[in-house]
Image (spheres, helix red, strand yellow):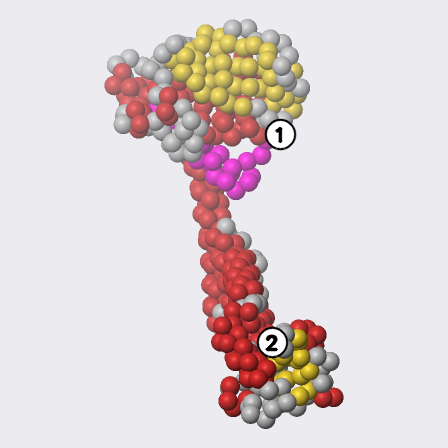
Amino acid sequence: MKRYRNVVIACGALYFLAVLIFAILTLNVREDYGREELVLKLNEIAHKVEADLTDTGSISNAQYGVDLVVTDTIGEVLFSSVPVESGRLSVETAIKKGYPYRYIFVNGQTSGYVIIPDDGMGQTLQLRIRIIIGLCVTGVALLITAGVFGMYVTKRIYRPFRELNDFAGRVAEGKLDEPLSMDRNNMFGAFSESFDIMREELRSSRLREADLQKREKELVASLSHDLKTPITGIKVTCELLTAKFDASDGMEDHKEKIANIYKKADQIDVLVSDLFSATLEELGEFKVNCTDESSLILTDIVNKYDDKGLVQAQDVPEVLIHIDPKRMNQVIGNIISNSYKYAGTAIEVSYRLVEEYLEMSIRDHGPGVPEEELGMILGKFYRGKKWAESKEEGSGLGLYIASTLMEKMDGELVPSNENKGFKITLMIPLS
């Protein structure tokens, strides 16, 4: 509507400029209209009167086609074809009113004047003034009409349409709790009602979807938790059978099969644990309870998950760190497990103090991760293309859960490649 207002103002300005130009061009119409003809008529009438000033009866307006007034030098009317107030018409009055006039000379002396009180331009000038006034009034009327029309369009069309547009934007953003205002005089009333019904349906659908998703996540979390009990039972049974067969000879084939069962059960245990943790995080139930702990706890955690004896760890600086021990076990366990699974090389663990953090670096000597994938490996369910094509099993949740837990403990997990190896840096907050 701002553009419409500017167009109306511009058109109005051009219109009144045209009226002004017309008024200026017609300002001197009296001077240009029939000047030669008037001069000839005045000269002819003057010569006629000069021949016999006392005989003005032979002169008539019909003879010359214009109204005539003949006066003496003091303004007394000698002849007039039109009524003259008070019987006098001086040449000064004729000059003020713009009447054409001509001196009458008798014997070389001024004896009177011939005056044409209406040179035929009176009506033309009045018409000119009326045209100018009419054009101005028409212009004002057009501007008022355009303004009223603009107000009508703004109120009945533009504003409701803008409200519909804003409403559609809110719906697209997912803001479904704000109803669309209704107006009885709204030209889009039917659309407004339909849009609001659509919003209500979308809101109800969104609520139903959210409720279903929550129930699905709760079911997954419940099943994941319940699965851990039989998996633990399988692992314990495998350990007992392994111990029993260790005491017997010639059972190598059975021990190998039991070891495979234990390995698969352990993989399932890790996957179920990761799925359980990810589901809790989505439900907002992934709690972290941080306490002040000695940094030496990190050595114990590393040793706990170094079941292949491939970890080469530096001594950790003795400081107080602010962590959740249970969650830190999960973080370091996932990192070492990934390194064993995908690299299978020695693992170097180093520490250093950096401002308000204890920096813990865990680095293997495997092929690393392609640079274009470094920013994605912390995403949920993401596995690198190379590892997705391999036979190694995985869910793509390990590093995602580890990164999420570090954030909840006010720390950070940073992946990087270093000397053809893959490194995870943990920024552990100090107390």
Amino acid type, mark 2: Arg
Residue 204, x across and y down, in percent? 49, 60
Amino acid type, mark 1: Asn
Q: Residues within 10 Å of mark 2 (few under 14, many from 20)?
A: some
Magenta span: helix, strand or loop, mainly?
helix
Per the model, the C-alpha gap separating discs 2 and 1 is 118 Å
Please tell me whether mark 2 or mark 1 is closer to you in this view.
2
Element at badge 2?
strand
Q: For residue 121, what is the image quadrant? A: bottom right
Q: Residues within 10 Å of mark 1 (few under 14, many from 20)?
A: few
Name the N-terminal-most of marks 2 and 1.
2
Element at badge 1?
loop
Residue 392, x across and y down, in percent? 31, 25
Please determine whether, in this image, residue 423 is positioned above or below residue 201. Answer: above
Q: For residue 146, what is the image quadrant? A: bottom right
* Residue identified by numbered label 2: 102
Residue at the far front: name it.
107
Q: Measuring 45% from the left and 20% from the top, which residue is drawn there?
A: 415
* Residue identified by numbered label 1: 289
Assign the C terminus to one quadrant of the image: top right
Residue 413, x across and y down, in percent? 50, 23
